[in-house]
Image (spheres, grey):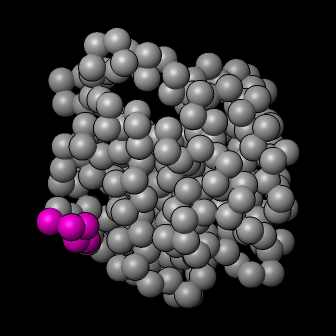
Amino acid sequence: MPERHRIAVTDESVAAVHHGAPSNRWLVFCHGFLSDKSGSYERRCLRAVDEGFNAVRFDFRGCGESDGVFAEQPLSAKLDDLAAVVDHFDPDSLVLFGSSFGGKVAFHATARERVDPAAIATRAPVTANAAFDEYESVVRREGTCRFDDDRAIDRRFVDDLAARPFDEVVDRVGDVPVAIFHGRADESVPIEHSFEAASALETDVVLEAFAGEGHIFTDDADERVLDRLFDWLATLDRV
C-alpha cells in the first residue's frame, strides 16, 4: 500500500505519497503549475513501481494537500519543497520527472545543487521564462494575476522567476542526461522552447515531439511517454 508522509519545509509541511518497490532506484514526480499530485500522477507512480522504481508524488506548498498559500510559493519555494522531499527519502539513485512548471523546478533544483539526480525527464517543460510573459504583464499592470478563488501570483513570483533564467541550468546541470517530451500543438509552452533548451544543454538530450498533442497530453500519448521514459532509463548506466 502507498505510504503517506508529511514533510517539513520551514514551519509548513508538504504532502507526499510513496509507492514502494524492492529496489534502490527512485523516481520523484514534480507536478505542473496549477496541478497537484493526484490523477495522472498516481497512474505514473504505479507504472514506475511496475518498472522497478520506488515512486514519489507530492504537492508543492499551496497545492493539493500541502500547507501554504499558492501566492506565497514562487519558484524558489518550490525548489525548497523538492529538496525537502528528496532529503526525506534519501534515495540511492534518483530520477526526476517534471511536467510543465514541474520540469522547471527539476532543472533548477539540479542546477543549484539542491538535488543530485542521475537523470532528468520532463514533459512540456517550462524552460524559457517567456512562457509566463502573459501572466507577468497582468501582474505588472494590475498587481496580481488571479487564476481562480484560491490561486494567484504577484510581484513576488514574477521577480523570483526573473532571477532564475534557463542560462543557470545550461551552466550548471553538468552531464546529467535529459529527456524532453513535448506536444507539437502545445499553445501554453511552445515546443520551440524545448528545441532551444535541448540545443543549449551540453549533456546528452533526448527530445521527442508528439504530433497533435497540446500542453495536456491525451491518455494514449501519456502512456507512450511512459513507454519512452522507461526505455530511455534502461539505456543509462547510472540509473
Between 143 and 20, which is closer to the camera in this rendering? Answer: 143
Residue in view at x 58 percent, y 75 percent: 116
Q: Quadrant of residue 150?
A: top left
List x then y, in percent, for residue 72: 24, 43
Q: Is residue 11 above or below residue 144?
A: below
Between 85 and 40, which is closer to the camera in this rendering? Answer: 85
Q: Quadrant of residue 228?
A: bottom right
Say whether residue 47 is visible: no
- Magenta residues? 7-11
Q: Is residue 106 above or below residue 182?
A: below
List x then y, in percent, for residue 163: 49, 45
Between 36 and 226, which is closer to the camera in this rendering? Answer: 36
97 falls in the magenta region: no
Q: State left or right for residue 84 relative to residue 10.
A: right
Please state the total of marks drawn on the protein image.
0
Which quadrant is the N terminus positioned in? bottom left
Residue in view at x 64 percent, y 54 percent: 168
Residue placed furthest toward the top: 141
Q: State left or right for residue 65 relative to residue 131.
A: left
Q: Quadrant of residue 234?
A: bottom right
List x then y, in percent, for residue 26: 54, 76
